[in-house]
Amino acid sequence: MIKKRNFDRPVSFWLDEELFWEKNRIESCLTIILRTRGCYWAERAGCVMCGYNVESDRRITQQNVLKQLDFVRKEIGKMEKIGKLEKPRIIKVFTSGSFFDPSELSKETRSKFYDFVEEVGAEKLIVESRPEFVKNAEEVSEREFLLEVGIGVESTNDFVRNRIIEKGFTFESFKEASKFLKDRGFSVKAYLLLKPPFLSEGEAINDAVDSSRTLIEGKYVDIISLNLMNVQSRTYVEKLWQRRFYRPPWLWSAVEVLKKVKGLDGLIISDPVAAGKKRGPHNCGKCDKEVAEAIKRFSLTREPKVLEEVECECKDWWRDYILAEKVARVPVGF
Ligand code: SF4
Ligand SMILES: [Zn+2]
């Protein structure tokens, strides 16, 4: 049965905590996932791991999006009335594509979100965009709040990004977008993908660490978010996974990358999605929850000892797995 979607409701929204890294504080954060017409790149080619467009629909109009904003406004108003709301200092507005793509959110619609951030009294807005649309961030210059733009660069290696992930933009265009944003005082967050298909576990760790080094040393980003692959429906990665040609990364691999990048003096965070599930990053099954929690905790506190404290016998299996997959080129067990 196909679930009927309500175009006037966001995909989801919730309140939690986020590291306000500019102020070195943990702050309350409102995240809104909007339902839009979707990422234009997904219609043309699409990235091999992306299933975000499942939530989008070409029939969604700007009026629908504004109704979604009204819905969130009313819901948080209700929470405030019953004293359940800690005023969010940070607001994240994510679409299934690019916040600054005018075909997803028009200039007028975007300005209503800026008004909302000011109305709530939040100090920071976080959005995501492909590099080709970031010029529209200029419109935020006059606003009172800070802006952070997340860009899914995935890897700084053009072969990995474009030939494997099929991202459709070069590292050069990412660097131009980053410069444009930084010149205007905005922050840049780079999303890196841990374990694109066709990379062994060890190669994936090296690619994430090398990419982080390039981003940090070139001063292209303020913060890196390490995204651990989870197998989304109706994607190319799902086809590989179903045929046992792909295994999502071990959580130990993420721990390894975080430790190494912290050593480069870089600001890196990660929030593992679907951790411990077959489709998500996982270890042996026994320690998944604990290791995923440690990764989240590290991302809030930036305390390396949080990562040192977790242990499990499967760490040795993970080390063997790295060696075995290097030779086998396909997942071996687990
Ligand atoms: S650019 Fe982003 S939203 Fe668009 S297809 Fe790729 S991962 Fe999905
Ligand atoms: Zn384990």
Image (cartoon, grey):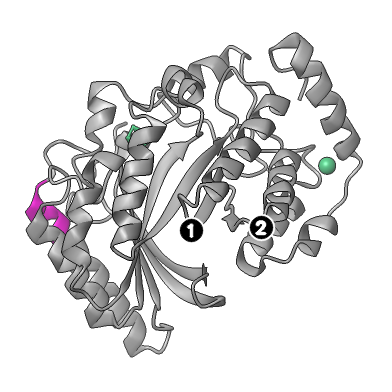
Q: In this view, does 203 lie to the left or right of 87?
A: right
Mark 1 residue crowding within 10 angstroms, few (<14) / some (14–19) / many (20+): many
Q: Quadrant location of the N terminus? A: top left
The disc, 2 or 1, on the residue closer to the chain's N-terminal end is 1
Vertical side of 50 occupied by 98: above or below: below
Residue 255 in the image: x percent, y percent?
A: 73, 47
Q: Which residue is depicted at the point 76% across and 38% down?
A: 283
SS for dot 2: loop
Q: Which residue is depicted at the point 59% across and 17% down?
A: 198
**Displayed-image quarter of ligand 2:** top right
Q: Is mark 1 within 8 Å of ligand 1?
A: no
Magenta residues, as a range? 61-66
Q: Is residue 8 left or right of residue 90?
A: left
Residue corresponding to mark 1: 222
Question: Is residue 145 part of the magenta span, yes or no?
Answer: no
Which residue type does callout 2 highlight?
Answer: Asp
